[in-house]
Amino acid sequence: MNPSVDFHAFAPEIILTATIIVVALADLIWPDRSRFVSSRIASIGVLAALIPVITLAADGATRSMFGGAYVVDNYALALKGFFLIVAYVSLLVAVDYISDGDYYQGEFYFLMLTSVLGMLVMASARDLVTIFVALETITIPTFVLAGWKKHDEGSNEAAIKYFLIGVLSTAVMLYGMSIIYGETGGQTLLSGISTYIAHHDTTAMFAVAIFLTIGGFAFKVSAVPFHFWTPDTYVGAPMPVTSFLSVASKAGGFVALLTIIRYGFFPSQDSWEPALWVLAAASMI
C-alpha cells in the first residue's frame, strides 16, 4: 500500500525544498549576480514557507502520516514558525557579510536553507530514523558553513573541530539508538518505544542506550562533554554563521532532545532524569 501523504501538512517542507533547488540553479545561471539573485530567492522562499505554517495553525487539526512517524500539530507548527523566522533574520544578516568577502554566494544560501529544512523535519519527527536523518540534515551543512572563511586558519580550525566532535557524537547517538531498537523488539516509532517502556521492566542495557542517545544530542546543545567545539567554532566561523549556529541550530538540538524524551523515553524516568541532571549541572559549572 502506498502511504497517505497530506500535501498541505508537507507544504512548508515542499516550498523550502523547491527554494533550495531554485537557489542552486540560479547560481549556475547567473553566477555574477549571485549575491542579489540567490539571497532574494532564499528570503522569498523562507517567507513563502511561513504561509502554510500559518494556514495549518489556523486549521488547528493534528495531522499524522507514515504510521505516526511524522506528525504536524501545534507543537511542530510553533517550532517550524520559529525556525523559519530565525532563518529569515540570518539571511538578512548574511547578505552584506558574505558579499564583501571572497566567498561563494549561492552555495552559502543553499547550505543554510538545507539546514533549515532539517529543522522543519525535526519539528514533526516522531521516529528514531526520521530524527536521525533530520539531525544530520541540520548538522552536515553547518560543518561547511563553519569553515566558510576559506583563507582564514581560525575558520578552518573551527570547521575541523566541529566536524570531528560531531562525527563522534553521531556515532555515540546511533549506537544508543541501535540498542534501543534491539531492546524494544524492533521499534523505531517513539510512541511504540513509550508503550514498550510502560509495559515492560527496562534493563540496565536499555538505560545505557538512553544515556548514549541523549549524549549524542548533547553535542548539538553544547552540553558537557561535547562542548569543546563551541568556543573555537563560534569565534572562527563567519558572524552570520555563528548567529545561526547559536540560535537555530542549537534550538534544533533542544527540539530533538525534548521530542525523543517526551514522546519516547518519558515512562523510563529513572533512566533519563539522572542523565539530564548530570549534563545540566556539569554544563552550568
Image (cartoon, helix red, strand yellow):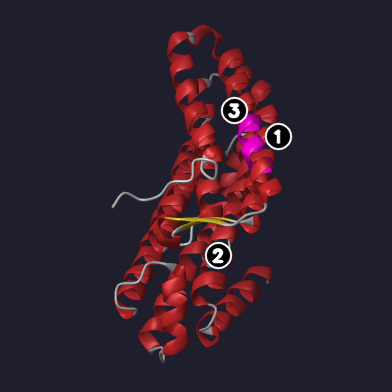
Name the side, left or right, on which 173 lies relative to 240: left
Q: Report, in whole angstroms, how far the alpha carbon at label 3 lies from the one at label 1.
A: 13 Å
- Magenta: main secondary structure equals helix
Compare marks 3 and 2 and give the one earlier in the sequence: 3
Q: Which residues lie in the magenta part?
A: 45-54
User: Nearer the observer, disc 2 or disc 1?
Assistant: 2
Secondary structure state at the residue bearing disc 3: helix
Q: Which amino acid does label 1 sit on?
A: Val
Q: Name the residue under label 2.
A: 259
Q: Which amino acid does label 3 sit on?
A: Gly
Give the label on residue 89, or none: 1
Q: Position of residue 54 (x, y in %)?
A: 69, 42
Secondary structure state at the residue bearing disc 1: helix
* Tally of numbered tags: 3
Q: Which of 163 and 213 is in front in this view?
A: 213
**Residue 168 appears in view:** no
Q: Name the residue under label 3.
A: 45
Compare marks 3 and 1 and give the one earlier in the sequence: 3
Q: Where is residue 80 in the image (x, y as percent from the top left)?
A: 62, 47
Compare marks 2 and 1 and give the one earlier in the sequence: 1
